[in-house]
Structures are given as C-alpha cells and as structure tokens.
Amino acid sequence: MIGGALAGFAAAHATGSPAIGFAMAALAGVLLSMVFAVLSQYLLSNQVATGLALTMFGLGLTAMFGKPYEGVKAPAMMAGPLGLNLMIWLGLVMVPVVWWGLMRTRAGLVLRAVGESPESAHALGYPVRRIRLLAVMAGGALCGLAGAYLSVIYTPLWVEGMTAGKGWIALALTTFATWRP
C-alpha cells in the first residue's frame, strides 16, 4: 500500500495525470507483491513474518525515495457523479463484483479451493502455485490502488508513512470476518 502511494503520487506528479498515477500504483503493487509471492510460495517463508518484513522494507524504501515529493501537491482528479471521486465509485462497484466472482463463479470456487485445501485442488489438476501467484498479484494491484487513493485523492500530497497502518486494519477486518467476503 505504501509503495503504491509513492508510485501513484510520483507518476501523477510527473505526468499531471492521476489516471497514470493509479496505473503506476497498481503496477508497483504487483511488483512488490511478487517479492512476497516468491518468498512465501517458492521459498516457503512464514507469510506473517514475510509480510511484516516487507512492510518495514516498504516504509524505509518509500521514506528514502519520497523525500523529493514532500510538500508537493498532487494534480486534481475530476469528481464523478454526486461529487464523489471516480475511484470511490470504482470501489463501490468492485465490492459486489468481487464477492460475486468469489462466491458464484467456477474461478472463485477454484481460488477458494486453492486457499482452503491446496492438496485437493492439486489432486483435481489445478496449478496451485500459479493460481496463488495470480491471486497475490491481484491483491497487490488493489493495495497499490488503495495507496494511490491516499496520496493522490484523500490527502493530495506525499507524506512519509502516510498509510499509517491502514493495510493492517484491512487485514484485521478480514480476520474478524472469518475470511468470508
């Protein structure tokens, strides 16, 4: 999330286009999530410890590379219907779409099977590692978009450590919801 916040802000500032900022934030989220995926899926590191370590790495990395952007304002993004930003509308639409995709489609069933019973999914011939990597990449892209929302729209400026634990709050909400969307 913090990597997406910096990448999104830097790209939006450099190009003057918040849309390009969001695209670069999603790409940064994917790239950073792939580090997590390689460590946890191929090197079999502990996912919680790896997540904590990468969070600290991301905070330090963005603090270093974000210095030139402190005090700079992000380009304005147009408001959508009812005065709400377009990213808010995208988020509101994505919630039921993702739920429907996870709960009502074959791909969602396969994804849930890979997460809950990888041995069973493998026995049915599904490429467990590849599906997990794609899921981590999708999650990374969404986290990057969330970070860009913070730096480009919510507080249209870059501040070191601006995510302030918001990603951990999302993880806690997921846990309290007993991993059900």
Image (cartoon, helix red, strand yellow):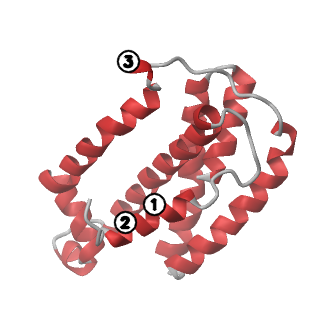
Residue at mark 1: 170
Alpha carbon separation for disc pair 1 and 2: 6 Å
Q: Amino acid at mark 1?
A: Ala
Q: Is residue 43 above or below residue 63?
A: below
Alpha carbon separation for disc pair 3 and 2: 30 Å
Residue drawn at x 64%, y 67% is: 54
Residue drawn at x 37%, y 62% is: 130
Which tag, 3 or 2, sits closer to the chain's start? 3
Residue 167 showing in the rendered view: yes
Quarter occupied by residue 176: bottom left
Q: Is residue 5 above or below residue 164?
A: above
Residue at mark 3: 81
Judging from the image, what secondary structure is the residue with disc 2 in?
helix
Pinpoint residue 164: horizontal percent, then vertical percent. 64, 58
Residue drawn at x 44%, y 69% is: 172
Pinpoint residue 96: horizontal percent, then vertical percent. 24, 43
Residue drawn at x 30%, y 68% is: 177
Q: Is residue 160 above or below residue 117?
A: above
Judging from the image, what secondary structure is the residue with disc 1 in?
helix
* Along the viewing direction, whichever of 158 and 126 lies nearer the viewer: 158
* Along the viewing direction, whichever of 112 and 181 lies nearer the viewer: 181
Alpha carbon separation for disc pair 1 and 3: 27 Å
* Along the viewing direction, whichever of 68 and 39 lies nearer the viewer: 68
Which dot marks residue 174?
A: 2
Find out whether the residues at labels 1 and 3 contact each other: C-beta distance under 8 Å. Answer: no
Left or right side of 99 for 25: right
